[in-house]
Image: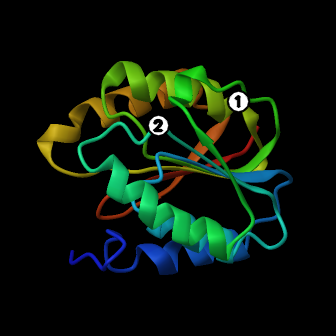
Amino acid sequence: EAANDFYMWRGEHELMYALLTTLKAVGAVLEVGVGNGGTLSVLAAFANGREVHAVDDFSYSDGENQQRAVTIVLNAFPISLTTAKSRDVTWGKPLAFVHLDGGHTTVDVQADIEKFAPCVSMGGVMVVDDYTTAASQREVRKAVDDYMLAHAVEWIAVTAGPKLGIWRRVA
């Protein structure tokens, strides 16, 4: 699928919009790994009054330019940005929606899921980026599948798109 200037696949912003505007769960919206801020801008625009938080350490190859792009988003929306590795962040707030797009190793994905998934409120949504993409992302899928297998009674799969795996908390 073609991406736009914010590196979102065609239809991703519509899917995020649909998920957020129909969400009944209690809690904040969180994005782990904000990249250029494209998804973050959509999450903030349609958070329906929920607090919006973002975590990223901007340690990747184009981190400085991506920080500049995210600054534009931060100036447009009330977002709390924590510049740190997600493993170093303490989190205790309930989440209505979490978008995980941080580290892509099995260890990083496992750590993010184990930290943030338990915070998702009943009826809340967890979206994992790069769940269905190329073989290079097998570690993402393995970490998510292992977690979901161990917590199968708590989550139902909603859908998987060109890049995303999406689950709703049911218990």
- 14 or 47: nearer the viewer: 47
**Residue depicted at 30% across the width and 80% down the height:** 4
Residue 131 seen in the figure: no
Residue 65 drawn at (x, y percent): 34, 58
Residue at disc 1, secondary structure = helix
- As drawn, the label of residue 77 is none
Q: What type is the residue that disc 2 sits on? A: Asp
Residue 123 against residue 92 in the figure, above or below: below
- N-terminal label among 1 and 2: 2
Quarter holding residue 146: top left
Tag 1 residue = 118
Q: Is residue 132 above or below residue 112?
A: below
* Residue 57: mark: 2
Q: Is residue 53 left or right of residue 87?
A: right
> Residue 16 occupies which quadrant of the picture?
bottom right
Q: Nearer the viewer, mark 1 or mark 2?
A: 2
Q: Position of residue 147 (x, y in %)?
A: 49, 25
The reply to whether residue 112 is in sight is yes
